[in-house]
Amino acid sequence: MTIKNRFLTSYIGGIVIASVSILTILCIAFYVTTGSVSTPKTLYQSFTKQRSLSSEEELAYVELRNIAKTNPDKFLAEDLQKNLQQIEQKSLGVVIRQDDEILYYSKELVEESLIVHFPSFNTNNIETKGTIDNAGRLYRYIKFDFYYSDKAKGSVLVLKKENSFLEFLTKWGIIIIFIILLVSIAAMLFLNQLLRKTIINPLENLGQVMSEIREGDLRVETPTLPVNTAKEIQQLTTNFESMRTAIFISKQEQQNLENNRKGLIASISHDLKTPITSIIGYVEGLQEGVADTPEKQEKYLKTIHTKSLALNRLIEELFLYSKLDAEAVPFYFERIQLAKFLAHMVEEFQLYNRDVQCLLHVNEDVYISIDRMQMNRAFTNIIENSMKFKKKTKSLCMTIEVVVVDDMVEILVTDNGQGIAESQLPFVFDQFYRGEEARTSTTGGSGLGLAIVKQIVEKHNGYVKIQSKLHYGTTVTIVMEKA
């Protein structure tokens, strides 16, 4: 069964159960209080029996009762009709009985019905009020029983026509039932339409989106929901959209990782093949006696040694990059004074590179939280990158400057080297990118230096950026939080 049919069934079932429950409770209540289950007619009669008399009814009753007490035979005289007609002008009815014979009754009443339904005689006049059925119409009455002079039983009734609910139903019942049915059907159609708009349609749209996603289209977006959509459907749609977005992003990341893996394999193959090919060539030259002099042999061996060192350095950097990418390198953070760390690093660097001028400018006493060894590796890669691309006609000069901006620390490493073309700046932190057309290794670089710098800085919750102009030097900026 569909959700729509289930809701429709629940609506109808709820109405039926509520109606039956109310009717059952009413029946039980009447049975407990009266000892029987009343019909609508007897129930109505019991209600009208307790109602007070109107002033017209009371005056007419008192007048006729006085006659019955003082001179009951007067009801047999014809001159009483004038008084009775005055009473009838007040929308009241009068009935006079002698034994089982109706002596007088108002024009609107039916004699045969009066004979059948006339209340029982009661000498003590205990039950004086009630409701009488006259040809299908209900009349409220007040009765007084007495004896004529000849000891015949007499009764006088003052009646007032009731605006009977049963009479109303008899006359208008079919129309009312028809109207109720129309209103009920209209209400059901409205509820059904509202249900379809706020629940069924959103679920169908969500199912359609699921079908498209199952076929591999993760770009499809969940349709916008109407304002009055059920809260549970809104929550379901929101959660589904979040799941779809997460899967889409995950798939994109997976695709990017796959592309990076393919690119990494291609780059590794290229960068490993070049030095290995050179080493094989020089080894074969030695084996075949091409290097027939000690000077050539020494040159060949020196070249093999240089290529082997470059190959070993590439493998080490590749291994480090892979471990950083897989988050397999442990980081041990400590709060250090930045000025002392940079001063020690510059001092150690200039011990082995006296031809490079390195200036340090730190004006504030700043502390940061870093892994000494990994951050030292990052600065070493930046400096070595500057050395590889220094100008051939000019000695290399580097400046390390610290700038504090609010809670952030910017470490600027500036050189006066060759600089980088503007078109190449977006790619300098990519793996294996050297900015060389033929990807030669003439500079001795692996293309992983700045990529490793980026990974190390990001592991410190910072970021790195670069500014450069061809032939005018380069500035690499590391931005981190103060500790």
Image: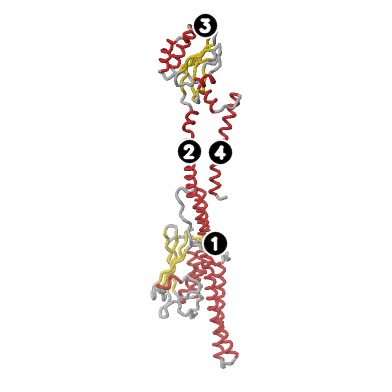
Report the residue marked by disc 2.
178
Report the residue marked by disc 4.
16
**Callout 1, which amino acid?**
Arg
Q: Residue 231: give x, y in percent of width and height.
A: 50, 48
Is any atom of residue 49 visible in this view? no
288 displayed left or right of 71:
right
Report the residue marked by disc 3.
149
First in residue order: circle 3 vs circle 1: 3
First in residue order: circle 3 vs circle 2: 3
How crowded is the residue under tag 4: few (<14 C-alpha within 10 Å), some, or many (20+)?
few
Q: How many labels does the image show?
A: 4
Could you say which is closer to the camera, residue 51 or residue 140?
140
Q: Residue 387: give x, y in percent of width and height.
A: 46, 75
First in residue order: circle 3 vs circle 4: 4
Could you say which is closer to the camera, residue 76 or residue 298?
76
Q: Which mark is residue 26?
A: none
How crowded is the residue under tag 1: few (<14 C-alpha within 10 Å), some, or many (20+)?
few
Report the residue marked by disc 1.
214
**Callout 3, which amino acid?**
Ser
